[in-house]
Image (cartoon, helix red, strand yellow):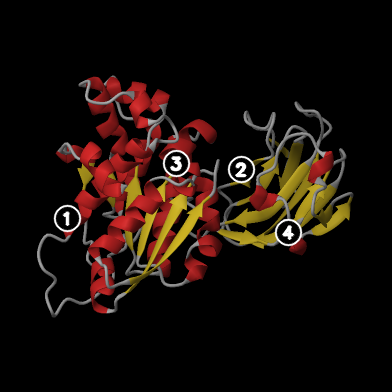
Amino acid sequence: MLVALSLIASSGFAADHLAFRGDFQNARIKFEQSKTGNVAFIGGSITEMDGYRPMVCEILQRRFHETKFNFINAGISSTCSTTGAFRLQSDVLDRGDIDLLFIEFAVNDDQDAHHSKAACIRGMEGLVRHARIANPHIDLVITFFVNESMLATLQKGETPLTIAAHTSVAEHYDVSTIGLASEVADRITDGTLTWKQYGGVHPAPAGNAIAATMIDELMSEAWAEPLAKSAAIKPHPLPESPLNPTSYWRGRFIDPASAKIQNGWSISVPDWSSLPGSTRERFRKLPMLCGEQPGDTVSLSFAGTAIGAYVVAGPDAGMIEASVDGGPFKVVDLYHQYSKGLHYPRTVMFATDLEAGEHTVELKIADKTRSSGNAARIIQFVAN
């Protein structure tokens, strides 16, 4: 299938749509010399789905047919780069020394999270800087997918906010990027592709093939010359300072079991059958820190500069009042635009710019709600 789709996809790529940056040899050296490879993909539903990811896996297997690959699908539908930064350790880095990591969050940062430029940078830089600190040899590729509003922006000759923010991170760390979004916009503008042929937000096979073929082209450009016998893996340079000092490059999960319940909350698997709205299978058996009544209170001690929670927010999602170190309470709304019929996974932040050190956050379910209930269901606390 990939061969046929490549014929559809490969009509030549504009030079500014495929940006080869830095050194991209470590993964190749590992694949050729040791005949093993660990390759991971992190992103939202575009990554989780049967789309560009398995096509890229097939490309790598074709290029290195003697290599035994371990492919990791760390895509989770609906999640943005903020959630990605906090789950990178558990979902990717804890699963072995990763040689090559593909990252995709431009669409979800736009339409799901509605991130500001600063939030986009905090999430994407959190992923990139954390990955490079954990494994200085890791090769990275960031791919920019596209939705209708981003397409319209590109066709006006402008750059969507999420792509501009993620590109600034890629440039700072010399990470190669795949400008699928601009490639698709140009093809639609010149009449060689339609949005329907591309497949929409979740691309059709032909749309995913464009992305996979662009990645293949990046490999061809980076690996054009035969590998020297003396070639050796070397660390990537790491900028001394991050682009944004508050980026989530120390992002991690904190087990909700470490929280101190003052009243009302409990750790349990929600009775999904009795709740309105659908629930994705990956969350159905997970114990969560659950509170449902106004006034339910819990506290957590943590170290770092930021604190939040990775939650599922459904039709009954409420609001949380959060106070750090005894300060004023800030109201955080868990309900999302997609919560009406789905227990939607998202990360909400209670504080993002604390002084480094030990802190305590107190959470109280608010009386106010804009849903059918006041529920809070925390999968993990997140801290930076």
Q: Which mark is residue 220?
A: 1
Whether residues under marks 4 and 1 lie with C-beta atoms below 8 angstroms apart, the answer is: no
Using the image, determine if residue 292 lies above or below residue 259: above
Kind of residue at badge 1 = Ser
Q: Residues within 10 Å of mark 4 (few under 14, many from 20)?
A: many
Q: Which mark is residue 346?
A: 2
Q: Residues within 10 Å of mark 1 (few under 14, many from 20)?
A: few
Q: Which mark is residue 384?
A: none
The residue closer to the viewer here, 241 or 210, is 210
Compared across the picture, whether 61 is left or right of 348 comes to left
Kind of residue at badge 4 = Pro
Whether residues under marks 4 and 3 lie with C-beta atoms below 8 angstroms apart, the answer is: no
Most distant residue in the left direction: 225
Residue 298 visible in the snapshot: yes
- Whole-angstrom CA distance, mark 2 to mark 4, is 16 Å
Q: Nearer the viewer, mark 1 or mark 3?
A: 1
Q: Dot 1 lies on which element?
A: helix
- Whole-angstrom CA distance, mark 4 to mark 1, is 46 Å
Q: Could you tell me residue 32's position as x and y percent?
A: 23, 73
The residue closer to the viewer here, 276 or 246, is 276
- Whole-angstrom CA distance, mark 3 to mark 2, is 15 Å
Q: Dot 4 lies on which element?
A: helix
Tell which circle, 3 or 2, labels the residue nearer the N-terminal end: 3
Determine which residue is flagged by label 4.
256
Q: Quadrant of residue 11?
A: top left
Q: Quadrant of residue 222?
A: bottom left
Most distant residue in the right direction: 263
Kind of residue at badge 2 = Arg
Q: Could you tell me residue 339's position as x and y percent?
A: 67, 32
Question: Residue at (42%, 48%) from the top-left corner?
Answer: 124
Determine which residue is flagged by label 3.
120
